[in-house]
Each structure stands twice: as C-alpha cells, then as structure tokens.
C-alpha cells in the first residue's frame, strides 16, 4: 500500500516543482507599441516646401509642425531610430531574467553604429519596456528610453532621455491605439527645463473623420496654441492660431494647397 501511495505522489511532486520554478514558465509575448507611439508620421508636411512663401495657410501649418517636431525630437534621433527598427526585429525569451529581449544594431547617419537591447518585462497584463543603447568606445547600456503598456499595446507611456552626457528626461509621451474605433493618439511633452518646458505636440489619426489627421501644438514659450487638421491623402486642411491670425477662426486650404474660405 505504501508503495502504491508513493507512486501516486511522484507526479504531484514533479508538477509542484515545475510550477514553483519561475524560470520554466514563459511569459506571454507582448505586442510591440505602434510606431505612432514614439514616431508619428507627419510626411504630409514634408513636401512642396518651395511653395511656403506663396501659400499662406498651408505654409504656416507645415512650418509650425516641422519646427516644433524638430524642437521635440532634438537629440532623440538615436532612441527614436532604435525603436522604429526594433518593430521589425524578432524577440527571444530569456529564461534567466524572465524577459523578452530584442537585440540588434542600428546605424544612424553622422552619429555611428549602436547596439540596442530592448527588453519587455511582462507582469500579468502590464508590460515594462526598457531600451538599452551602447556605442562602442563611448558608453554602454544607457537607458535612452523606457515605458509602460498593456499586453495588447493599445495604450501606454514613454520617457525619452536627452543623452548619455545629460541623462535627464527630455520628453514624455502618452499614447493610445484603439483599433476598433480607428483612433490613434500620441501626446509628446517637453520635460527639459528651459523656454519650452511643458510645451507639447499631440498627434491624432481618426480614420472615420473628414479631417482624419490632427496636430495640436502648445507652445509655452510664447503662450500660443496651434491646431492643424487635414485630410490624408487629399491634403486639404485648416489651421487655427490666435497669435498668427489674430482671431480664433480656422483658416483653410484646398487639395492644391491654395488658400480658400473655410466651409461654413
């Protein structure tokens, strides 16, 4: 009888030992946050720049988006590039740390070749992301960006740091990606002390709206808010800025980028 009882207990003991060993339990692989969470596509304003002096409304919108994007992304081309390239890399599960890991190299023109180690720490439905970046002969495993998301990557945050030489927070981002509603949104806020502290750019895509792209720029340096709406792919749109136009109305352009009266 004792022998039979012992044999019955062996599978239970083995099962218990396996379940207590966290190293043998692979966490679910998380969805990567969307590219728009850190690098929204503003290509609509990268063309026809030669016409900026003759087309008032579109040119002001294009210049504003370009200038303020440059301010926000200053010094951040390396971490943003690292994240964008990481979207196309394969991850492996590291049993020794219980982390999902993406490891790869990137080349940034005029800056060098960097090694990137992106990790995802899954805790239930929450994911902590850390982007370690190294440059041979210069620095190793600098945390250039980190953030949180849920397991399905439809909402989260990022913090991007200025540089290995000045490792303070430069930008924070709050983002969402609602596939069922067709709405994605990202808001980037300046955390660095200075003239542009607490300035922000919010970028929204709403696939169901007539103006399916929206950018809101809050410039704390001059106490001005600029709101830009446009349609992708037609290009027609509108802009509102009290500092520029001395009113609170929208100012529109058509699909040839020429100024028009806004529809009533």
Image (tube, rainbow, N blue to C red):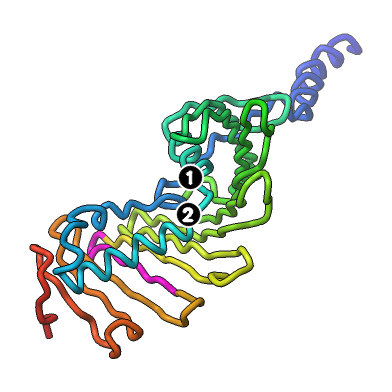
Question: Does 68 appear in magenta?
Answer: no
Vertical relation: 255 (above or below) 9: below
Is residue 189 positioned above or below 121 on the image?
Answer: below
Is residue 60 placed above or below 241 in the rendered structure? above
Alpha-carbon span between mark 1 and mark 2: 7 Å
Quarter of the view holding residue 208: bottom left
Residue 69 point in image, percent of width and height? 41, 59
Q: Which mark is residue 73?
A: 2
- Measuring 44% from the left and 40% from the top, which residue is drawn there? 84
Residue 100 placement (x, y as % from top left): 60, 32
Is 209 contained in the magenta span? yes
Q: Give the number of marks.
A: 2
Tell me the element at label 1: helix
Q: Which residue is mark 1?
A: 77
Q: Quadrant of the C terminus?
A: bottom left
Nearest to the observer: residue 20 or residue 80? 80
Please identify the quarter of the rendering in which residue 235 is found: bottom left
Q: Please, which residue is most extreme toward the bottom here? A: 247
Q: Which residues are magenta?
A: 207-218
Residue displayed at 64% across by 40% down:
121
198 or 21, nearer to the observer: 198
- Could you say where residue 210 lies in the image, as x and y percent from the top left? 18, 68
Rendered view: 73 above or below 137: below
User: Residue placed farthest to the right in the image?
Assistant: 2
SS at mark 2 in the image: helix
Residue drawn at point x = 59 percent, y = 50 percent = 147
């Amino acid at each position: 009888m004792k022998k039979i009882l012992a044999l019955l207990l062996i599978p239970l003991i083995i099962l218990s030992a396996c379940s207590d060993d966290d190293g043998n339990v692979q966490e679910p692989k998380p969805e990567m946050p969307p590219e728009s969470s850190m690098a929204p596509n503003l290509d609509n304003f990268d063309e026809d720049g030669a016409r900026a002096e003759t087309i008032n409304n579109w040119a002001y919108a294009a210049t504003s988006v370009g200038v303020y994007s440059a301010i926000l992304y200053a010094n951040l081309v390396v971490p943003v590039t690292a994240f964008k390239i990481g979207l196309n890399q394969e991850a492996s599960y590291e049993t020794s740390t219980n982390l999902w890991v993406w490891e790869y190299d990137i080349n940034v023109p005029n800056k060098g070749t960097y090694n990137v180690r992106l990790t995802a720490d899954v805790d239930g439905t929450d994911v902590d992301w850390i982007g370690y970046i190294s440059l041979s002969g210069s620095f190793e495993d600098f945390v250039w960006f980190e953030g949180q998301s849920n397991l399905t990557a439809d909402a989260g945050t990022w913090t991007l740091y200025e540089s290995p030489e000045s490792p303070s927070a430069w930008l924070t981002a709050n983002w969402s990606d609602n596939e069922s509603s067709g709405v994605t949104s990202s808001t980037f806020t300046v955390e660095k002390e200075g003239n542009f502290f607490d300035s922000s750019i919010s970028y929204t895509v709403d696939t169901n709206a007539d103006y399916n792209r929206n950018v809101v720029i809050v410039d704390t340096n001059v106490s001005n808010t600029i709101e830009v709406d446009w349609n992708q792919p037609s290009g027609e749109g509108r802009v509102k800025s009290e500092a520029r136009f001395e009113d609170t109305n929208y100012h529109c352009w058509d699909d040839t980028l020429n100024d028009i009266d806004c529809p009533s």
